[in-house]
Amino acid sequence: MDSEFREMMASFPTGVSVVTARDSSAAPWGMTCSSLCSLSVNPPTLLICLRTESPTLRAVLTSGAFAVNLLHGGAERVAALFASGAPDRFERVAWRPAGRT
């Protein structure tokens, strides 16, 4: 796991991600995040910065879990969509819930 985490973070020196979480009713929330960095490999630890009033932050705190979706260079549309706050953003992208890791 350590080598996989190190390799992933090394290939993402800077960029944009979408941080997602599900609230207590399993509704998905997400926002564009450009503040992301690796703090340590063992244990794998990330630092993300979310707006205090964000419903995504509330979902993270409620669920105790979140996902970081690293975006590639051609994902400007997704980054803009999740930065917009559009209530239907999860209906406008292909996604699937993942298990906890």
Image (cartoon, helix red, strand yellow):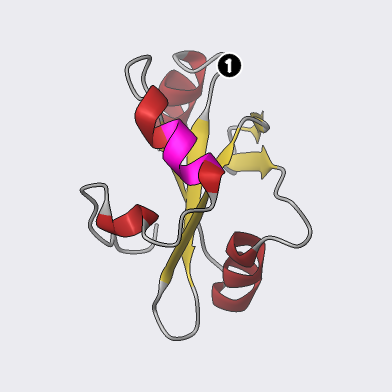
Q: Residue sitting at 49 percent across and 18 percent down?
A: 12
x then y, percent, for residue 63: 54, 75
Q: Horizontal placement of 42 versus 49: left or right?
A: left
Q: Residue sitting at 62 percent across and 40 percent down?
A: 46
Q: Report which residue position mark 1 lands on.
A: 14
- In the image, residue 26 above or below residue 18: below
Quarter location, residue 13? top right
Q: Residue sitting at 50 percent across and 58 percent down?
A: 66
- In the image, residue 71 above or below residue 47: above
x then y, percent, for residue 83: 55, 41
Quarter location, residue 40? top right
Q: Residue furthest right?
A: 52
Amino acid at dot 1: Thr
Q: Residue furthest bottom?
A: 25
Residue 80 within the segment the image draws in magenta = yes
Quarter location, residue 91? bottom left
**Which secondary structure class fits the magenta region best?**
helix
CA neighbours of label 1 inside 10 A, class few (<14), some (14 to 19), many (20+): few
x then y, percent, for residue 76: 40, 23
Magenta range is 79-83
Tell me the quarter of the image containing the C terminus. bottom left
Q: Horizontal placement of 88 versus 40: left or right?
A: left
Residue 96 within the segment the image draws in magenta = no
